[in-house]
Image (tube, grey):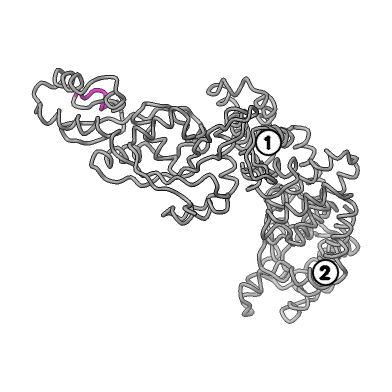
Amino acid sequence: MQKYSVNQQLIQTLLSWVESGEIAIPEIQRPFVWDSSKVRDLMDSLYQGFPIGYVIAWQNPDIRLKDGSLSKGKKILIDGQQRVTALTAALLGKYVIDKTYDRIKIKISFNPITEKFEVQNPAILKDKTWLPDISDAVNGTQSILKLVRHYLELNPDVDEDQVEKSFTILTDIPKKQIGIIELASELDIETVTEIFIRINSKGVVLSQADFAMSKIASNTLYDGNLLRKAIDYFCHLAISPEFHKHIEDHDKEFVNTEFFNKISWLKKEVDDLYDPEYTDLIKVAFTSQFNRGKLSDLVSLLSGRNFETRTYEEHIAEESYTKLKTGVLNFVNETNFKRFLMIIKSSGFISNKLVRSQNALNFAYIVYLKLKELGVSDVKIGSYVPRWFVFSILTGRYSSSPESAFDFDIKQIANKDFGQILSEYEEAELSDAFWNFSLPQSLDTSVASSPYFNVYLAAQVKANDKGFLSKDVLVSNLIELRGDIHHLFPKDYLKKNGLERGMYNQIANYVYMQSEINIKVGNKPPEEYFSKILDEMENQSNTLSGISNMVDLENNLAVNCIPKEIISMKIDNYENFLTSRRRMMAYKMREYYFSL
């Protein structure tokens, strides 16, 4: 089967398709990221007769309407949006949405004597040898004769033939050709993705979330365009709450929708534990509402696909947009979002530094939303959600093939008691062998961002553990205040004794410690700095640490999973120390997990 057709079309034909809606360029499918100089260069290339590449469009399938008739599907632009947007801005004088979501015009000026293009600026506006805005010349509002006559009135000494020649080439730009690769409507999204990767010279990979978002944004019948805005705006507001004022000032249409009211609470939100991108939001909304995990299914459902008959039906598209809207509103709901974050934080994950798996966090939110929908009690949700979150981190459940894992897990949750599911998974994957052997081995790493180390730190936070050698300062304080991770066996000491980076930077050698205490410890081996600590405790001077007695010291070592033998350790004991501490850390993580 021919998977696509390749045609040359006049630029004016392409732009007419855009204006009529036959080819869909969602308003904020992507903010326009080209700077104005790239638009200028594109115009120059067209003027010079240089090729400007291909755009790729995917034909939507024809959809069966309620009255039995067929509606011709639109084309969705999946590659080349920046070029096409640049053409509509420069040639038609249309507004574009820039990187900061401002609605702007990009005006390109042209000098017919030098045949140069420039971005319009105050100096050009004062110089009569420049045509200030080429859209005035190429949009068909005035003839070439009037254009030349008016220019010569302003510049009587210039070469008339040169001006006429230059303006003729300029006004013929819309008649230049552009290549259009049109992908067949019968293709599934995996094939479309593969074709896109093979055709696109830059090798840019579009995710299935990108296709889904393009699909959503191109729909106006069921307010997909507004739904897409809600998704984009929520994600932007989560990072920049001040953007709320910008929406109020520049997007009155959206302000009058229910979506704006539902996301406005973010204007006062500063928490950054969970700042979702649009891919995260759509995954959660889709999976929680459709009980499916593969976004290719979403694209098909929004097209109205009947998986049994393999036809496309309007009522399926309508139902799918309704369900997706419900999923998005559930996600952005202030109560849901804040309650979910409270649950995650109460389990010890108080900082985004401790969350390295966005997919684990996404699915934890899916679990929260699904259990709430199923009527599970708040008490059980408060236990199940963090436990599943930590379980998925410890087992790396969503680190590879996350869509398949999402799909499998949501189908289980939708059809089976969640407590039973969790128990079965724990029995299969969190056996004694995992806690006693596999987890300690996983802690044998030098990567400070290790998910296992983050779970260990969350366990310390939940237990209100104090930092190493600290009398009052908690590990949670050190994490929240951007405290530093230090070495129990000082790094310089280990380096001087010939250890390589992979050995002295072991996470079993890491500990949260106040910087001032770390400075006093210096590069001394444990037996030396502990000897000083013990002397100070005996003399009640306490200049190195705030701990004043042996009971408190042993307790501080215990909560930080440090074998008490460290007091007399030196270089020869380092490897045994690492082994012992890994076991202690794993035991603490086990106790923590089953306390959730």
Seen in the picture, residue 187 relative to 126 is either above or below; the reply is below
Q: Nearer the viewer, residue 584 or 266?
A: 266
- Determine the secondary structure under disc 1: helix
Residue, x 64% and y 27% (percent of image)?
67
Give the CA distance from mark 2 to mark 1.
Answer: 46 Å
First to last magenta residue range = 123-128
Q: Nearer the viewer, residue 563 or 59?
A: 59
Q: Is residue 127 magenta?
A: yes
Residue 143, quarter of the rendered image: top left
Residue 241 showing in the rendered view = no
Seen in the picture, residue 543 relative to 315 is either above or below; the reply is below
Residue 273, quarter of the rendered image: top right
Residue 396 in the image, given as x and y percentages of width and height: 73, 61
Q: Which mark is residue 316?
A: 1
Q: Which residue is mark 2?
A: 434
Q: Which mark is residue 120?
A: none
Residue, x 9% and y 28% (percent of image)?
159
Q: Amino acid at mark 2?
A: Phe
Q: Viewed as shown, does residue 157 lie left or right of 75?
A: left
Which mark sits nearer the N-terminus, 2 or 1? 1
